[in-house]
Image: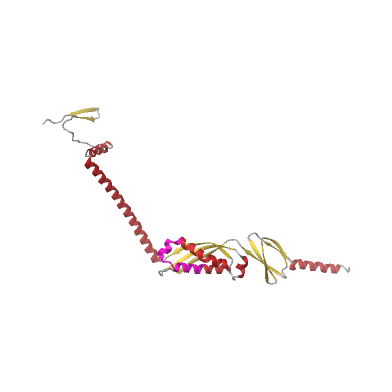
């Protein structure tokens, strides 16, 4: 009996120790753990299971999978003073968990601000025509400007893409009119090219007929031979008789023709 009470006390103490003084944590493959001992950073933990005492240590888990940051409807001024609404999307991941946690209070907000500033800088240095012509190049410039700044806060910027560029209503109408006029001009140009090609063909044919008049009669006979219901009258030389075959319902007749006697 004298050992029962101490044994119970020991069991209770051990139970409380394992419940409150020691814990197990599992860090998944796509996570990293930041371990702090007595408030001081100790080490970065890779994926696995760890035992630690919450009385002395704290482990903070951080998801390092790629993430997306989106800026929607950001109003910026172009170099020619036109207000645009621009939307972009950025893909990034945590490259250094320690920097991402210690360098800023929120690395998401920090990256968002850097993207905003870079967007204003690039759009403010280009006019409308340059923005429309070099949209892909602007995305590359955004990545070039923001990637080093993202690395300073422990982030790796994978890609930055401009999604939408919205113009004011009146400017949309102007651009629509410009595009319509351009298409009409292209249509007229193609029509003029077709007419020029037709005239060129006619001119070449006229030259050939002028040098060889018999080509005109041959072409006429060829054309009429491909159709029906036409009457053909030919002027033949007076020196040679002509035999014309006429098809009738009762059969074929041969009509002889001789040149007129002078």
Task: Estimate the x, y position of residue 187 in percent, counting from the top left.
Answer: 33, 54
When the figure is inspected, residue 134 is found, relative to residue 223, above or below; the finding is below
Which quadrant of the structure image shows residue 221? Answer: top left
**Which stretch is magenta?**
115-135
Residue 127 inside the magenta-drawn segment? yes
Judge left or right: residue 146 versus residue 190: right
The quarter of the rendered structure image containing the N terminus is bottom right
Queried whether the magenta region covers residue 131, the answer comes back as: yes
Question: x, y percentage for residue 195?
Answer: 29, 50
Going by the image, does 3 lie left or right of 104? Answer: right
Residue nearest the viewer, comparing 108 with 114: 114
Query: Against 182, is 241 above or below?
Result: above
Quadrant for the C terminus, please. Answer: top left
Report the residue at 38% width, 61% height from top. 176
- View extreme (bottom): residue: 39
Residue 231 location, quadrant: top left
- Asked which quadrant contains residue 170, the reply is bottom left
Q: What residue do we see at 34% from left, 55% from top?
A: 186
Residue in front for this viewpoint, 253 or 250: 253
> Relative to 26, does residue 211 appear above or below in the rendering?
above
**Percent coordinates x, y for residue 45 in the rendering:** 67, 63
Residue drawn at (77%, 68%), measured in percent from left and top?
Answer: 17
Q: How is the image coloured?
A: secondary structure
Magenta segment main secondary structure:
helix
Residue 64 left/right relative to 51: left
């Amino acid at each position: 009996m004298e050992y029962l009470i101490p044994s119970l006390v020991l069991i209770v103490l051990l139970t409380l120790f394992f419940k409150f003084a020691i814990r197990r944590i599992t860090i998944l493959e796509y996570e990293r753990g930041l371990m702090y001992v007595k408030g001081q950073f100790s080490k970065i933990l890779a994926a696995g299971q760890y035992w630690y005492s919450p009385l002395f240590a704290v482990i903070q888990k951080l998801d390092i999978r790629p993430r997306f940051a989106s800026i929607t409807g950001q109003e910026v001024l172009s170099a020619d003073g036109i207000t645009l609404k621009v939307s972009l999307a950025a893909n990034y991941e945590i490259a250094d968990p320690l920097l991402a946690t210690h360098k800023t209070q929120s690395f998401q907000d920090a990256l968002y601000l850097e993207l905003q500033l870079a967007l204003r800088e690039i759009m403010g240095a280009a006019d409308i025509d340059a923005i429309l012509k070099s949209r892909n190049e602007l995305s590359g410039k955004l990545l070039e400007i923001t990637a080093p700044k993202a690395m300073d806060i422990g982030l790796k910027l994978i890609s930055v893409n401009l999604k939408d560029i919205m113009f004011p209503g009146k400017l949309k109408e102007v651009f629509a009119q410009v595009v319509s006029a351009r298409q009409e001009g292209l249509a007229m140009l193609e029509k003029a090219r077709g007419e020029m090609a037709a005239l060129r063909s006619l001119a070449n044919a006229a030259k050939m007929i002028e040098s060889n008049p018999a080509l005109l009669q041959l072409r006429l006979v060829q054309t009429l031979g491909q159709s029906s219901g036409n009457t053909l009258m030919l002027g033949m030389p007076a020196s040679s008789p002509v035999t014309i075959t006429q098809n009738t319902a009762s059969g074929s007749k041969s009509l002889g023709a001789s040149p007129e006697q002078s």
